[in-house]
Image (cartoon, rainbow, N blue to C red):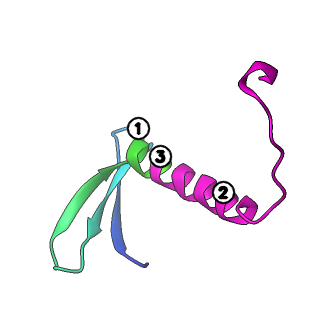
Amino acid sequence: MTAQAKIRTDGKGRFSGAFVKRPSGHAVFVRAEAMDESLEDARLNAIADERASGPFVQVSLDDL
């Protein structure tokens, strides 16, 4: 997925978010924290997908 974004900074030049153009043509503001969370979720999902077909080890709850 690609998107066009206009980066926004606070008064001190730090990244605060971006205006992202949606397919409908409307732009929405996305906070930097929300983008960070989405990227982290995507990375974790990629790791889970890689490990989905891997070996499994059975443990009991008492072992944990």
Q: For mark 1, does the 10 Å Cα neighbourhood hold few (<14), some (14 to 19), or many (20 or more) residues?
A: few
**Which numbered disc, 2 or 3, marks the residue that appears first in the sequence?**
3
Q: Position of residue 10 (x, y in %)?
A: 34, 41
- Residue position marked by numbered label 3 in the rendering: 37
- Residue position marked by numbered label 1 in the rendering: 12
- Distance from Cα at disc 1 to Cα at disc 2: 38 Å
Residue at horizontal 56 percent and vertical 50 percent from the top: 40
Residue 27 versus residue 47 in the image, above or below: below
Q: Position of residue 52 (x, y in %)?
A: 70, 62
Q: Nearer the viewer, mark 2 or mark 3?
A: 2
Q: Secondary structure at mark 3?
A: helix
* Tag 1: amino acid: Lys
Quadrant that contains the C terminus: top right
Residue at horizontal 34 percent and vertical 68 percent from the top: 5
Q: Which residues are magenta?
A: 38-64
Q: Quadrant of residue 61?
A: top right
Q: Secondary structure at mark 1?
A: loop
* Tag 2: amino acid: Ala
Q: Secondary structure at mark 2?
A: helix
Q: Which mark is residue 48?
A: 2
**Which numbered disc, 1 or 2, marks the residue that appears first in the sequence?**
1
Q: Main secondary structure of the magenta part?
A: helix
As rendered, which of 54 and 19 lies closer to the eye?
A: 54
As rendered, which of 28 and 60 lies closer to the eye?
A: 60
* Tag 3: amino acid: Glu
